Image (tube, grey):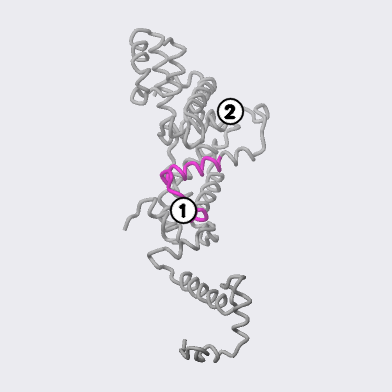
Amino acid sequence: MNNEQLQIFLDSHGADPARWPDAHRAAAERLIARDAQARAIFAQAQRLDALLTRTHDAGAEDAAAAARVLARLAALPRQKRPFWHWPLVLLDWQFAPAWPRVAALAGCAAIGFMVGIAGLDRTFDRLDAQSVVASRDIGSMFEPEAFTGSRP
Amino acid sequence: MDDSDEALMARVARGDQPAFRVLARRHGPAMVRLARRILGNTADAEDVAQEAMLRVWTHAPRWQPLAAFKTWLTRVVVNLCLDRKRRAPWVELEAAGEIADSAPVASELAETDERERLLQAAIAELPDRQRTAIVLTYSEGMSNAQVADILDASVSAVETLLVRGKQNLRRALGGIIDEGD
């Protein structure tokens, strides 16, 4: 490592040896120990780091600014829900709030009822047979068999 | 009750406004500070912090805890700051006048000493990503790897930003660095 490389190394990793990567630490320390120019570079890097670390601290000002921002957010907008939100709500074990699950359950029941009475659960090959059965007198379904006399 | 950031975010995701306000109070000042250091003035920093808080609220249901909440929030603030700087009208360096006059924070730093005022002005003059890398490293105490994660860049790219940023600072500050404490 030469002085130019040391400068780049210190700019990349800072002047705190605790933050230096192990792979280059020994070489940097050796150079600083034996070369006066390297020590000057190191000292200047330490001063620059100290300046940068000790920049204007406006803790109270920032807290006041954050409080102003929070006050502006008194009314929050609607949250953006992912499309898989509603199925997950149904699986939420905490059951709070309950109305989406109740509404979904009622909706499923209503859809099931409608599908059932509309006959949408029948397959195509059974549609004709079903319509024939539906057209007959429903009471004939319970009449005894013509040959055996047994009842269904 | 678990009041970690991640637990609070889970509550915010269910529309819990008090949990959101706890999170906002906890991280608000740090958000403003980071934005102020990148943008150079408190008014813009407040706008960015407000937008960041709104994103916390609106995006909470879709937030995945792949990274720590603070890392995610820092990334949001940094991206909002860089977007704002990108949208801001460009002012030529010559038109901006002397460093002391062009610093947007000059009035706010009137009570600080001259050397710090010049340092702030020099930092304000840095290109956006160089300034952001410097701020994240020295004001937020992040490692190069953490800065790379926030800036969505490689570690070597961050090192390049730091090297160029410090070269620019040395040029701008000259002997001020060597004046000692």
Amino acid type of the residue that numbered disc 2 sits on in the rendered structure: Ile
Q: Which residues are magenta?
A: B57-81
Residue A147 spot, x, y in % from top left: 51, 89
Mark 2 → mark 1, Cα distance in angstroms: 32 Å
- Residue A125, quarter of the rendered image: bottom right
Q: Quadrant of residue B70?
A: top left
**Disc number placed over residue A87 in the picture, else none:** none
Give whichever of B7, B77 is nearer the camera.
B7
Q: Chain of mark 1?
A: A
Residue at which label 2 appears:
B99
| Residue type of the residue flagged with mark 1 | Ala
Q: Which mark is residue A67?
A: 1
Image quadrant where one finds the C terminus of chain B? top left
Q: Main secondary structure of the magenta part?
A: helix
Queried whether the magenta region covers residue B61, the answer comes back as: yes
Side (left or right) of B4 relative to A11: left
**What residue sits 60% from the left and 84% below the top?**
A134
Local secondary structure at mark 1: helix
Host chain of mark 2: B
Mark 2 or 1: the one toward you: 1
Identity of the residue drawn at 43% across and 69% down: A97
- Residue placed most toward the observer, B152 or A4: B152
